[in-house]
Amino acid sequence: MFSTPQPRRGIGGPRLRACAAAALSLAALPALAQPAPAPIAGHPSHGTPHVTAAPVAPTLSTLRESFEAAWARQPEAASAAQYRSAAQARQSVANGWTPEPAALELATKTDRWHRNEGSRELEVGVAVPLWLPGERGHSQALAQAEIEALDARQAAARLRLAGTLREAWWQLHRDRLQVELAQARRDSAARLAADVARRVRAGDLARADQHQADGNVAAAEAELAESRAQLAVHEQALRTLAAQPLGAQSDMPEPLPQGADPSAGPVDEQAVAEHPALREAQGRLRVAERAQALAGAQTRANPELTVATTRERGGQGERYAQTVTVGVRIPFGSSGARETKAAAAAAATLEALAQLELERLRIAGEVASARARLAGASALAQAADRRATLARETQGFVGKAFRAGEIDLPNRLRVELEAADAERQSAIARLNVSQAISALRQALGLLPQ
């Protein structure tokens, strides 16, 4: 009896069944570990209190949904509002008329404690700090640079999280694919073992062939168990990042970015200039430069303008006289602390400049590597698809020959293993293409879509 070649197995049904089984098993763990509620005394249901069902959190099915859920619980997202408030407060101080708040001065003088001739003097004044030349403008520029650097730092933190999430996302899909392929191999091995057992009973094959077929089933079951264990580990890792239940996740690749073809020439410099990591480095450089300029303007302590009025009398019976005093306090020289601050600001500027150049080179190298990786993954996927097609056809031919008794069981097992390996390599190669697209988007500084 002849049979037609097996059609190519899809990855939808087994994957959904594997995902459902994993989700049910993981969802049952908290319930098993949770102790039963204690009965409530006097309750009409005799120890079965009414329990209000907790709202079910929405499941995550796309890479973008998982990224937004993961970012919402990151420390950078939680502290962004407070950092922005602090930067705006520094900007308000820089826009003020004085570098420090004005101070009230009160003083009194009397001879009551020694001569007591009625001499009295009362002085009330206000001391106002003054900006040094250029200090106010540099302070405003530094405050503005800090606000811009905060936005760039937030964007860079989002991109770093996107890279971590992309790795976990595609690793989970790889594990699910391995589970599906292992399940398919186990089913194929079970069918072959059943066919061999039938022929052993009919006397066409020896018991040794039955043992080989059963050993093949055992190896497939071991591979399936190992794949399921890896799937549980990486599924928990992704769930930890997103902090929400995982649904039937889509394995659709992200949109192919511009500049994906290595033969298209170098990547647009404008696109690289908008990279969040490069913007973060540029923001640090601007802050360092503004801080250095401010340190250069703060050569000494701030001068003070003093305006005071004095009411005094020389002795008992004399009339009080009113005077007004206007003065300026100008510090001389600069302290060692200010020189240290200026030197530290200059060092921070040089470090930020060097870091910017390294970041630009790193981004350019990552983009070039990601483009080459995508090109290689695409070529490998095409070759793996051709090999899988040929292996399926060979599997069909050998299956017919085995049923007709033209070849022995070892050759049939070898062809089955080669076909299973070809299917695995083809499916993994297609997954590698999707992962390479995500890696290229990550190198270009694009968030998940």
Image: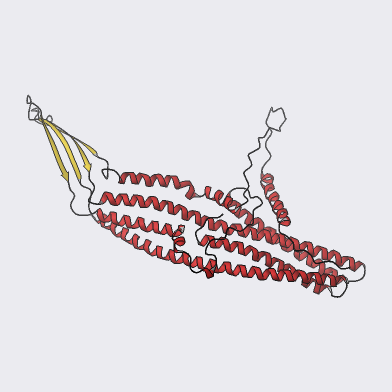
Q: Could you tell me which residue is drawn at 86 percent across and 75 percent down?
A: 406
Q: Vertical placement of 124 versus 26: above or below?
A: above
Question: Where does residue 82 sit, x and y in percent of width and height?
Answer: 43, 45
The mark tally for this picture is 0
Q: Vertical placement of 344 versus 261: above or below?
A: above
The color scheme shown is: secondary structure
- Left or right of 192, for residue 290: left
Question: Where does residue 150 sit, x and y in percent of width and height?
Answer: 41, 51
Question: Where does residue 394 sit, x and y in percent of width and height?
Answer: 78, 72
Residue 436, by quadrant, is bottom right
Q: Is residue 418 visible?
A: no
- In the displayed image of the protein, which residue is found farthest to the right? 202
- Left or right of 312, for residue 98: right
Q: Vertical placement of 380 versus 238: above or below?
A: below
- In the displayed image of the protein, which residue is found farthest to the front? 264
Question: Where does residue 330 sit, x and y in percent of width and height?
Answer: 17, 48
Task: Compare residues 421 and 193 and report the one nearer the observer.
Answer: 421
Q: Could you tell me which residue is drawn at 36 percent across and 44 percent down?
A: 89
Q: Can you say which quadrant of the picture contains the N terminus?
A: bottom right
- Left or right of 105, for residue 370: right
Q: Is residue 177 visible?
A: yes
Q: Can you say which quadrant of the picture contains the C terminus?
A: bottom right
Q: Could you tell me which residue is drawn at 73 percent across and 55 percent down?
A: 13
